[in-house]
Image (cartoon, rainbow, N blue to C red):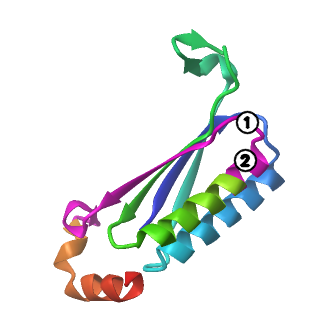
Amino acid sequence: MPIGYLDVPTGVALSAKRDLVAAMYDAMHEAYPFPDDTRIFLREWPGDSVSQNGLLGSEPARPVFMVYVPQGASPDVKRTMVKKINAAVAGAYPLPDPAIFIDERPLDLVAINGGFLADDQQRVEDQAAAYS
């Protein structure tokens, strides 16, 4: 279920993006192994479409990664994931201070195909076993 959005500047080669998402997937899947349904969306922005402190194109754009994940991973597991994602992003985009935001959601606030994940008792049990 992890779904991530990486906002970055344009201009990185396709091969670097492939390496980047593979490394990010590995880090996310290690932290959130169940189910194996991890999505990463790269959102690229030209410099004239990014503002810092009210000024367009004034600074190199800081990469920002927002990931939506289920609750349950331990703080140590999340620390490891963040370090690996940070290294992958910094390797592909040599820019200052990548930011990572983790948004944890309980299964009663996530619906797939019209149904809440919390209503699937087997899913709840399998996730608890995977994240404990």
The image position of residue 103, as x and y in percent, is: 37, 53
Residue at position x 62%, y 59% in the image: 83
Q: Looking at this view, name the residue that lies furthest to the front.
A: 76
State the SS at label 2.
Answer: helix
Q: Report which residue position mark 2 lands on.
A: 90
Q: Callout 2: 10 Å neighbours few (<14), some, many (20+)?
A: some
Using residue 65 as the reference point, say whether residue 88 is left or right of it: right
Using residue 41 as the reference point, say whether residue 61 is left or right of it: right
Q: Magenta stretch: residue 90 in it? A: yes
In the image, the segment drawn in magenta is 88-114
Answer with mark 1 or mark 2, whichever residue precedes in sequence.
2
Residue at position x 29%, y 60% in the image: 105
Q: Quadrant of residue 120?
A: bottom left
Q: Is residue 125 above or below residue 80?
A: below
Q: Quadrant of residue 71?
A: bottom left
Residue at position x 40%, y 63% in the image: 69
Q: Callout 1: 10 Å neighbours few (<14), some, many (20+)?
A: some
Q: Is residue 52 above or below residue 29?
A: above
Q: The residue under label 1 is which amino acid type? A: Leu
The image position of residue 37, as x and y in percent, is: 48, 72
Given residues 94 and 17, the one toward you in this image is 94
Using residue 105 as the reference point, say whether residue 121 is left or right of it: left
Instruction: Tell me the distance, in whole angstroms, between the alpha carbons under discs 1 and 2.
Output: 7 Å
Q: The residue under label 2 is which amino acid type? A: Ala
Residue at position x 66%, y 15% in the image: 57
Q: Magenta stretch: residue 42 in it? A: no
Residue 95: numbered disc: 1
Question: Quadrant where the C terminus lies?
Answer: bottom left
Residue 56: numbered disc: none
Is disc 1 in contact with disc 2, using a CB cutoff of under 8 Å? yes
State the SS at label 1.
Answer: loop
